[in-house]
Image (spheres, helix red, strand yellow):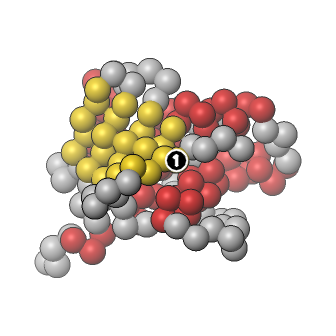
Amino acid sequence: MANHLRATAGQGEKLCFDYTNYLSASCKKRWSFIDAIYGVMPIFGIVTKTPQKHVQTRQEQLKALALQVLSTQVNDETNVIRLIALAQQQGIGRFDIKLPYSLDSAQLGAIQQEFGEQLLLNQHDERLSVVLPLLSENPAA
């Protein structure tokens, strides 16, 4: 399968999830019955398959988990929400998503509403930059 996730070297590791390549690879994939069930599960953000044991880096782990929760059976906005939630669960607070097109303001608003004011989204053409608070950074009440 194509490389859907790229990391840039440097001190502040920044990931880029190539959603366009994910869609292309998903269209070519031969789906099993179980894959189809996982793709349309109504429970948001649940990872039900165990990631492969050879996954070593955070980038590879996010890629493997993303391939489990993203689905061509739902809209792009829902997949972006799932990807952001997954990154947050994995402790990744900053990354880019390369999209096949620019999201419109309604889509960006829905994504923003899902995470609240602490989520920062910056779109430049087909690249969506995401900065979100990590789960451990949420202040205790």
Quarter of image, res 137: bottom left
Which residue is under mark 1? 5
Quarter of image, res 140: bottom left
The residue that appears at 73% across and 31% down in the rendered structure is 27
Q: In which quarter of the image is the C terminus?
A: bottom left
Helix, strand or loop under label 1? strand
Res 87 seen here: yes
The residue that appears at 85% across and 49% down in the rendered structure is 33
Q: Position of residue 60 (x, y in %)?
A: 56, 60
Res 85 seen here: no
The residue that appears at 56% across and 54% down in the rendered structure is 63
User: How many marks can you see?
Assistant: 1
Q: How crowded is mark 1: few (under 14 residues within 10 Å), some or many (20 or more)?
A: many
Quarter of image, res 80: top left
Q: Where is residue 87 in the image (x, y as percent from the top left)?
A: 42, 58
Q: Which of the pair 8/111 is nearer the observer?
A: 8
For the view shown, which residue lies furthest in the bottom direction? 140
Q: Where is residue 134 in the image (x, y as percent from the top left)?
A: 28, 65
- Side of 19 relative to 73 (left or right): left
Q: What residue type is labelled 1?
A: Leu
Q: Which of the pair 85/28 is nearer the observer?
A: 28
Q: Quadrant of the N terminus?
A: top right
